[in-house]
Structures are given as structure tokens and as C-alpha cells.
Image: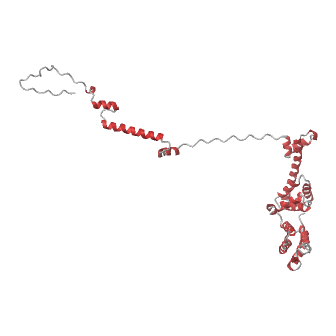
Amino acid sequence: MSAPPSQPFPPGAPTEPPGAPASLPEPPPASSQATPADDLDSALGKPKGVPVAVMIAATLGSLAVGTALGALVLGGESEPSPAAASASVSAPAAPVVSAPPPPPPPPPQSLAEKAGDGDKAALKELEGKAKRERTGEETLAVFHGELMQKRQALEELARKTDLVAAFGKSDDTQKAFMDAVKDPRQTAATLEVLAKMAGPMGPDYLYKVYRASPKSSLAEQLAIDLLMSKDIYAKASDALKVVVEMDQALQAEKKDCPGMIKLLVRAQADADTRAFRPIASLNGKRGCGETKLEDCWQCLRDGEGKEALADAIKLARKNKAPF
């Protein structure tokens, strides 16, 4: 800092004031002098040269921001800010849980289980054991295994019959199926094989079993029930459908004579020898009324009905049934 300029003294006055030291002491450096403003700046941590008012405003602003942040932290139920919502949306998805390990393979089958499923080698081994040496499980396995092999043989016959109709009509094939039906152990399984045949020969065999089995037996009832099932009946030939529907019309409590005429017309085109029996029964003139002495089919005695009946009988004798 430069020294202040010296003041001139009036003429004749001494050059120095009385009692004044010979020389004035040097003033301290500017950096060592602190003003009240400098002390306030130091207390607020403000760099020198910044106005006090600005620094106070900044401090109050910081306090306000801190208060607002505290309110956000404590206010757990307040609505999230757009920034927070955006952050939550863009959060990475949870890791995919790995699939559980596959179940262990089933244990190997025992000798009895293999024999019961029709395994030829296992069945032969058990059959070679003396009956007193078998367990109960092995005895049942032999029983079921033999039935399984018989069913497999019938399924092979059915497969060949679907391929070649003449094979199914042969005497040997007919005997194999009918003998199996007569065996109580094979009745249901044999009818199931017949019902699953793809062509019309399956329904033909079911009708044959129905007609040949004793009245009210399992074979008779199951055979006709399977035949009347809509998916199996749809495979039946037109000739068989005429026979079945004619049987139903004859057994109906209320006789439909005009409906029978329509069936006889169909029979002229489609009927075979299986229809001869029900058609011939229409010639009888008794069976209805309270005394069962009235004619059930009066409309067949003259005119169109009489002609239809006569023609149907002739054609039913002419067309040969599958077996």
C-alpha cells in the first residue's frame, strides 16, 4: 500500500509537528488486516469477495432443500415422483427360476409284471415253474399274460379282416371270434376288439354275436349296445342297418305301419338274407290289441304295402349275408 501524500505546512512553521516521532511506523500488510465483513465471511465459510446477503440466501436455500428431502423420506405413503416411477419401470426383471430336474426313470419291471403284460419269454419262464413254486402274484401274471396273448391274436385277426374282407368271412376267422366270445374270460375283450374294427365287418360280427348268444346274457346285451353306439353304427352296411331298424320296429310297443312300408322299400334295394326272418314275420296277423289277436300291420295286407312286403321277401332270399 502506498503512503499518503505529506501535507504542506505554512511558511515559517516547523517541518514536523511538536512531539511527533521522527518517522511514522510502516502500516501492516493488507493481508493481515481483517474487517468485520471479513470475519463474517470466514464464519459462514464464504470465499472472500462474495456479498454477505448472497451467502445468507444460499444457506437458507440449502436448509429448505434439506427439509423437503426429509419430508420425502418420512412420507412413506406419498405419491412417487415421475423420476422414481420411471426408475421402477426400468428395473431389471427378476431372474428366471430354473426348471426342476426330470423325474427319475421307473424301476425295471419284475418277471411277473412282464409276464402279465404278455411278454412271451417271461410268460414261458413262469409257466415252466411248478404251480406250488409260484407266488400268488406269479399265478395271476400267468392268467393275465395268457389272456393278453389271446387278445393280441384276435387283434391280428381284426387287422387282417379290415384289410381283406374275405379273410374275415372265412370259417376259421369266424370260429376264432365266436369261440373267444363264448369264453367268459374273453367275452368283453373280444367284443371290444370287434367294436374297434375300422370297416363294416366289425358291426356285422357284433350283430352275429347278438343273434347267436343266449337271451339276456352278457354277450348279447353288450353286443347290441355296442352296435347301437353312434360311432360304431355309422360303420355298418346299409343291409345291416335295414335289419337292425326292422328289429326295432317289430319290438316297439306302438307299431308304425306306414314307417314299416318305408323300411320294406329300403329292403328291396339293400336287404340280404339276414332280413328274411324279420320280413317274413310281417305276414303274421296277430300280436296286437288287449287280447294280442289283432293284426299289427294292417296296412301291409293290400295295395302298396302288400306289394312292398312281397318284393322285400323275394330280394331278402336272393342277397347273401356276409356270414
Q: Is residue 39 left or right of residue 100?
A: left
Pick the front one: 266 or 38: 38
- x and y, in percent, of residue 233 in the image: 81, 63
User: Measured along the vertical axis of the image, is residue 272 above or below residue 145?
Assistant: below
Query: Where residue 14 sits in the image (x, y, percent)?
Result: 9, 22
Dividing the image into 4 quarters, which one contains the C terminus?
bottom right
In this image, 276 relative to 92: left or right?
right
Q: How many marks?
A: 0
Q: Is residue 53 left or right of residue 198?
A: left
Q: Is 111 above or below relative to 309?
A: above
Q: Quadrant of residue 57?
A: top left
Asked if residue 165 can be seen in this view, the reply is no
Classify the position of the N terminus by image quarter: top left
Judge whether 111 appears above or below 259 on screen.
above
Q: Describe the colour scheme in one phrase.
A: secondary structure
Write down the quadrant of residue 204 in the picture. bottom right
Q: Nearer the viewer, residue 120 or 25?
A: 25
Residue located 52% across and 44% down the image: 88
| Residue that protrudes farthest toward the front in the picture | 290
The image shows residue 269, relative to residue 79, as above or below, that is: below
Q: Position of residue 210 (x, y in %)?
A: 89, 61
The reply to whether residue 220 is visible in this rendering is yes
Residue 262 or residue 121, whichever sits in front: 262
- For this rendering, which residue is in front, 205 or 182? 182
Residue 67, image x and y in percent?
42, 39
